[in-house]
Image: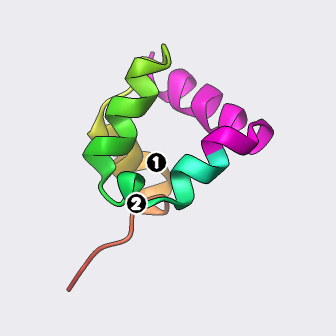
Amino acid sequence: MSADALQSFIAAVNQSPELQQFMRSTAAADVDAVAQDARDRGFDVVSRDFVEHRDGALVEYDD
C-alpha cells in the first residue's frame, strides 16, 4: 500500500542524513523527482501519494 510506503519513506528521511541532504537539494525541488528517488530506494510510492498526504502538507505549491 502506498500510504504505508510513504510513511516508511518519511521515517527513512528522518533517520538518514543522506536523505535529508537530498530533500534539501534542488534535485528534490519537484515532487516527481522525490517520488522517483523514493522508488529508486525501494519505496512503492508515486507523486500523488505526496500530494494527498495530509492534504498536501508535504508539497509546496507555486502560485
Q: Answer with the quarter of the image where residue 13 lies.
A: top right
The residue under label 2 is 56
Quick one: label 2, few (<14), some, or many (20+) residues within 10 Å? few
**Viewed as shown, does residue 40 lie left or right of 19?**
left
- Compared to residue 45, the image places residue 58 above or below, namely below
Task: Specify the label residue 53 is tagged with.
Answer: 1
Give the magenta part as a residue range. 1-19
Query: Element type at marker 2?
Result: helix
The answer to whether the residue labelled 1 contacts the one labelled 2, judged by CB atoms less than 8 Å apart, is yes
Residue toward you, 55 or 37: 37
Expressed as whole percent of the image width and height from the top left, the position of residue 31 reads: 32, 50
Expressed as whole percent of the image width and height from the top left, the position of residue 52 reads: 37, 48
| Numbered marks: total | 2
Expressed as whole percent of the image width and height from the top left, the position of residue 38 reads: 45, 29
Q: Residue at x 67, y 40 (%)?
A: 18
Q: Residue at x 40, y 46 (%)?
A: 50
The image quadrant where one finds the C terminus is bottom left
Expressed as whole percent of the image width and height from the top left, the position of residue 30 reads: 29, 55
Q: What predominant SS class does the magenta segment belong to?
A: helix
The answer to if 15 sits in the magenta stretch is yes
Q: Answer with the quarter of the image where residue 14 lies.
A: top right
The image quadrant where one finds the N terminus is top left
Residue toward you, 7 or 13: 13
Query: Element type at marker 1?
Result: helix
Q: Please, what is the three-letter code of the amino acid marked with disc 2?
A: Gly
